[in-house]
Image: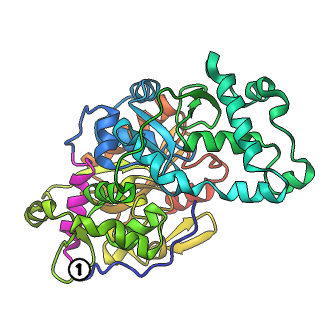
Amino acid sequence: MEARPTRRQPRTRSMNLAKLRAWWWHRTGLDGSLCDAEPAAVIERAGWARSVGGVGPYLTIFARSGAARAAIDDAVAALEVHELPSARGCTYVLPASDFALGLAVGRDFGGAEMKTAARLGVTEQEVDALGDAVVDALAAGPLDPDAIRQATGSASRSLGEAGKKKGLTTTLPLALGRLQTRGAIRRVPVNGRLDQQRYAYARWTPPPEVPAGDAFTELAGRFFRRHGPATVAEFQWFAGLGVKAAKLAVEPLGLVPAEPGADRLLLPEDAEAYAACQPDDAPRYALVSSLDPIAANRREIVTLLDPADRERVVAVDSGKRPLGGLADLPSHAILDRGRLVGLWEFDPDAGAIVWATFDGRRDAALDAAVSETESFVRDQLGDARSFSLDSPKSRRPRIEALRAM
């Protein structure tokens, strides 16, 4: 996960939190309006789904449309959705309509490894030459890294012990990363699944065309359409921009305050609909991942919490913390009309979801939501890792904390 951003808390006290949550609930498609929708349509509306070798993209789509894992994998194979380096250089699952934009806004964030390599004697020309060799090697079809290394021969080389200490054992990852950000090649999961991290690489012909105009203004438009009302600071973090650049990117949009005096902003065309938005009277639940776009793409969960729940102490990887002091969800989440009402984890030993609500609620609708998600995880995914290094052992403290709740 990225380092926690340093920004002031959004001014939400002056806003109607129930309305705010209800809008996000509807806007990201958790209200049932995306039932049976295609995976690409879900991501297009809900927002880019963070992929770190966990189940986030699957749960993002399933929670809204009910799509089976096989249908999601088919959409990946058909390039209707795809995992790409995009915002901040991080990997997200994007709809095809956003492929070019994702590559454009992520292009300038891949230089850290090259700076390290340069100190080890690697030149730009060397990496470009290796990239050409990789593209030639992929002419016959996708190859995994070992096969690429064999096919490119001496074009790639070991960086020895010095490189190993820096996390760069060979020059091949430098070329693969550069080619991906340029859209010349794409990464293909070897078993077709988004929650694994074993990849082959394929040529991308033709590569997506970079959009005309200011890519970050285009990104801002999508961000505020999907995640507004949002603050400029939240967009700044998502895009990986500086303060001045973020302000310049959003300026052409003519954003307006969601409510008088609030720093949460909307696109002007959404203001009337937001003003008319009201929460449903009856509870409606969704079990989402810890990286669901409703929270992760703003990297802020305080507005999803009722004030009474902000001081509630929960288990996190580093021990225990108050919920209101976290930027990221500590576990997968239970939402009711946009409000964060509980947490859940999957226990593969038991083949069951372990969950708890903050106020102890339990009703037929919640039981049905838990059962539906439990069946999806157990029967189609096998586990619910938050990220690649998450494991049943590492999440055991969080599971036991939920049982204690």
Above or below 208: residue 270: below
The percent position of residue 44, horizontal first and vertical second, equals: 31, 43
- The spot of residue 31 in percent (x, y) is 21, 48
Q: What residue appears at the point 29 percent right and 37 percent down from the top-left corner?
A: 41
The image shows residue 1, relative to residue 181, as above or below, that is below
**Residue 305 at x, y = what percent?**
34, 70
The residue tagged 1 is 262
* Residue farthest toward the right in the current orientation of the protein: 161
Q: Residue at x 41, y 55 (%)?
A: 333
Left or right, residue 144 beside residue 383: right
Which residue is depicted at the point 65% across and 23% down? Answer: 138
For the residue labelled by badge 1, is the local secondary structure a helix, a strand or a loop?
Answer: loop
Question: Can residue 349 be seen in the rendering of this structure?
Answer: no
Residues rendered magenta in the picture: 14-31
Q: Does the stretch in magenta take in 24?
A: yes
Residue 108 sits in quarter: bottom right
Q: Give percent across and percent down for residue 12.
A: 28, 78
In the shown orientation, is residue 69 left or right of residue 183?
A: left
